[in-house]
Image (spheres, coloured by chain):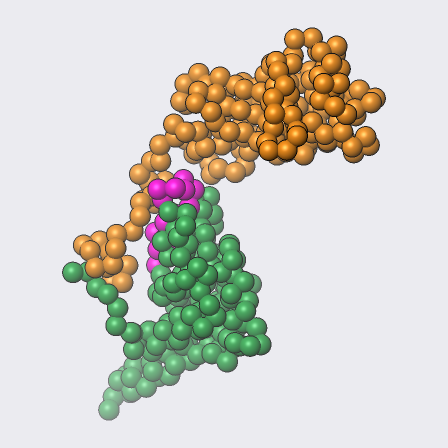
Amino acid sequence: MKSGAFYVSTVGKLLKWARANSLWYTTTGSSCCADEVLNAAGSRYDLERFGCIPQVDPRQADLLIVTGVVSYKVAPHLKAVYDAMPSPKHVLALGACANCGGMFAPEYSYSVVPGVDRIIPVDVYVPGCPPRPESIMNGLIALQEKINGNSRPHFKAQ
Amino acid sequence: METAALISKLNKAVPGAVLQKARFGRGGKHAIWIEARSIAAVAEALSSDPELRLDWLENLSVAQLDEALLLTYFVRSRQTEVVAVLRATLALKSEDELVDAPSVRTVWPMAVPFEREASELFGIRFGKGKRETGILPKGWRGFPLRKSYVFPQEFFQIAHSRPSPVGTSDGGSRDA
């Protein structure tokens, strides 16, 4: 076996494993889903056992958790936070508002972006209003599986 | 203090400012409807009267009636416990034209954030100073809380529309 092949296969797997199990995250606590992230990070659910450690600086974060409403005024700042994160970086859209605008649907709200994926690429969508900590953990595990190359089945365009 | 006594004081201080007394809400309260152009003079009179000393603007709310904006001032005194509700209407000229109203920020400094918010969302120019912005993003067009406001199709190159259901021609793109 050539040394290059060994590096790509084995070291690549090791890197993926390391990245998947050390998802340091920063959040945009813009609504009540942020409380559920706090619950998930607390002692009962203990996100740190998945390697998820909260960070305040996006430059030290691998994962951006968007927890709630994103208004058009905030959108450029959210993009700036995402751009400040070093690659490889991931985004978790948490709750109905971050996924699609939620109760602030574009028919009723003039100021809310109908889904954070209009601004930055999203890796995992966690539904709920707000999602329970179990859902958040499920989303993080789905992201870890995706980083490891084992994406769950999902809907595709027909 | 009874509303009738309040009105009689106002009639002496600012003649012609009071239009009528009307019931306010389900309780026994009353609102005093005043001429919109006399708002500042009425505020000054209520604030400087030694028996009233209405020195605290609790809230300023704005609502749109058919072709007019309804301003409601909730005023309270921190010394005499007197409360008052003042109401005035501003006629709308057109859908996208600013409406002028006197500012009360010199009498009640806490009116600044209320007036700024009403100015941005309803298109009211309070006083003769420059309109301040802070709530809406820069470059925003229109007054979003007016009934005539039509949502544009996109803001800052972000499509303002509901995502298509998963499985339709557009809906799966986010999973690609």
Q: What stretch is highlighted in magenta?
A: A106-121
| A124 sits to left or right of A62 | left
Tell me if residue B3 comes above or below residue B154 in the rendering.
Answer: above
Q: Which chain is green?
A: A
Residue at 39% across / 65% down in the picture?
A126
Residue at 40% across / 57% down in the picture?
A96
Q: Position of residue B115 (x, y in %)?
A: 59, 29
Tell me if residue B116 comes above or below residue A69 in the rendering.
Answer: above
| A38 sits to left or right of A116 | right
Tell me if residue A46 comes above or below residue A110 in the rendering.
Answer: below
| B132 sits to left or right of A96 | right
Which quarter shows the C terminus of chain B? Answer: bottom left
Find out whether residue A107 is within the magenta segment. Answer: yes
Tell me if residue B174 comes above or below residue B67 in the rendering.
Answer: below
Q: Position of residue A103 (x, y in %)?
A: 41, 50
Residue at 33% across / 73% down in the picture?
A146
Residue at 43% across / 22% down in the picture?
B66
Q: Which chain is orange?
A: B
Towards the viewer: B2 or B176: B2
Which quarter shows the N terminus of chain B? Answer: top right
